[in-house]
């Protein structure tokens, strides 16, 4: 019975399926609820209003023009990845409200994969997780975990390398890419997919880890995103924001020979990070801020 645990459903004494948290019966019930949720969502009044808005020729024209001005996926860029944007996403759900729908400050460019993941987690998710690539079923960490956030090229990796001690867990997507045989900031879709899967396994493992500490590197320009990570990781999580002024970040990108082939796209990703961050962040004189979030 190695690898098997009790079902997480309250009062159930059956063993969970391997790789899951529920027994076969409760897993089937959860899938049935999810299917019913999808059906309700697709036939709701909201869905009808959404179809009317998205079928409007003005939307198709406006979306095409927006993607011409913003050709890169914002979520991928926040991770230091370069991916063409193919869809316009509403950052805040419009719920069929035309005012929110047409508010261009509420638009962002996403690739199909990121847009589908965000929509699924907003509309159909039934347990755990959320947006911002937080894995479903992520449970509170058993060990202290420091979430290190900041712009691409801002110095997150250097900070973690200087602070982490032997035996501590470092969850860094770029490092995982290299461990899987690629290179840091690798853009090959299949390799990136494998790296995210490995990163998620490491995150899920924090709930039962006996390591002294874990470090998680994320971009997270929005305080709401950092708060979501803290809520998912539990009371032993804290956040450190590595945020030098934009000019310093861009200079660090230019000086790094490892980023030479991606210099322009990395600069764009960094500028996008400061554009998404709350007003005033780019003016912080120090390179490191302990936000106190989760303390």
Image (tube, grey):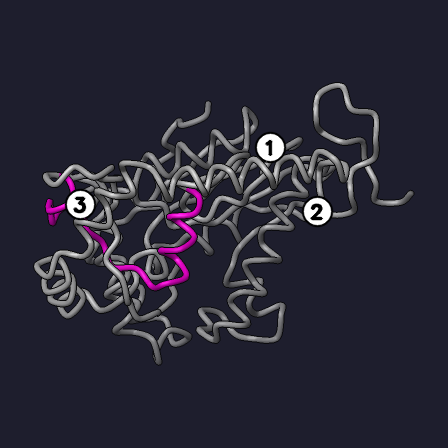
User: Marks 1/2: CA distance?
Assistant: 13 Å
Q: Residue under circle 1?
A: 144
Q: CA distance from mark 3 to mark 2?
A: 43 Å
Which of discs 1 and 2 lies nearer the camera? The answer is 1
Which residue is disc 3 drawn over? 106
Using the numbered discs, state the Cα–Cα distance from disc 1 to disc 3 in whole angstroms: 35 Å
Which of the two discs, 1 and 3, sits closer to the camera?
3
Question: 189 or 115, which is in the foreground?
Answer: 115
Give percent across and percent down for residue 24.
76, 40
Q: Who's the residue at 55% across and 42% down the image?
A: 136
Image quadrant assignment for residue 54: bottom left
- Queried whether the magenta region covers residue 57, the answer comes back as no
The quadrant in which residue 113 appears is bottom left
- Few, some or many C-alpha atoms within 10 Å of disc 3 (few <14, some 14-19, many ≥20)? some
Which dot, 3 or 2, sits closer to the camera?
A: 3
N-term-proximal mark, 3 vs 2 = 3
At 22% from the left edge and 54% from the top edge, which residue is drawn?
Answer: 108
Over which residues does the magenta segment extend? 100-121
Q: Is residue 235 above or below residue 150?
A: above
- CA neighbours of label 1 inside 10 A, class few (<14), some (14 to 19), many (20+): some
Which comes before the other along the chain, label 1 or label 2?
1
Instruction: Out of 39 and 212, give the one closest to the viewer.
Output: 39
Residue shown at 51%/67% (left/top)? 192
| Residue 167's disc number | 2
Q: Judge left or right: residue 198 versus residue 50.
A: right
SS assignment at label 2: loop
Estimate the x, y position of residue 258 in percent, counting from the top left: 42, 75
Q: Give the percent coordinates (x, y) of residue 100.
A: 15, 39
């Amino acid at each position: 019975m190695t690898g098997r645990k009790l079902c997480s459903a309250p009062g159930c004494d059956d063993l969970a399926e391997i790789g899951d948290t529920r027994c076969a019966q409760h897993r089937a019930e959860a899938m049935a609820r999810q299917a019913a949720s999808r059906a309700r969502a697709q036939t709701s009044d909201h869905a009808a209003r959404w179809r009317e808005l998205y079928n409007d020729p003005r939307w198709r024209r406006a979306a095409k023009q927006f993607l011409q001005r913003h050709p890169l996926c914002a979520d991928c860029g926040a991770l230091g990845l370069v991916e063409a944007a193919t869809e316009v996403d509403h950052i805040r759900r419009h719920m069929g409200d035309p005012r929110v729908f047409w508010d261009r400050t509420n638009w962002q460019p996403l690739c199909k994969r990121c847009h589908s993941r965000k929509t699924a987690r907003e509309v159909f998710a039934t347990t755990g997780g959320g947006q911002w690539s937080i894995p479903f079923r992520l449970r509170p960490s058993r060990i202290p975990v420091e979430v290190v956030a900041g712009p691409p090229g801002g110095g997150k990796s250097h900070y973690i390398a200087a602070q982490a001690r032997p035996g501590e867990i470092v969850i860094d997507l770029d490092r995982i890419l290299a461990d899987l045989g690629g290179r840091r900031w690798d853009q090959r879709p299949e390799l990136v997919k494998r790296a995210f899967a490995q990163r998620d396994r490491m995150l899920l493992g924090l709930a039962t880890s006996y390591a002294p500490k874990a470090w998680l590197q994320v971009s997270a320009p929005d305080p709401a995103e950092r708060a979501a990570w803290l809520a998912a990781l539990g009371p032993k999580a804290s956040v450190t924001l590595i945020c030098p002024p934009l000019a310093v970040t861009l200079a660090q990108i230019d000086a790094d020979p490892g980023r030479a082939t991606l210099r322009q796209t990395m600069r764009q990703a960094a500028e996008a990070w400061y554009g998404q961050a709350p007003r005033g962040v780019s003016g912080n004189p120090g390179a490191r801020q302990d936000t106190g979030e989760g303390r």
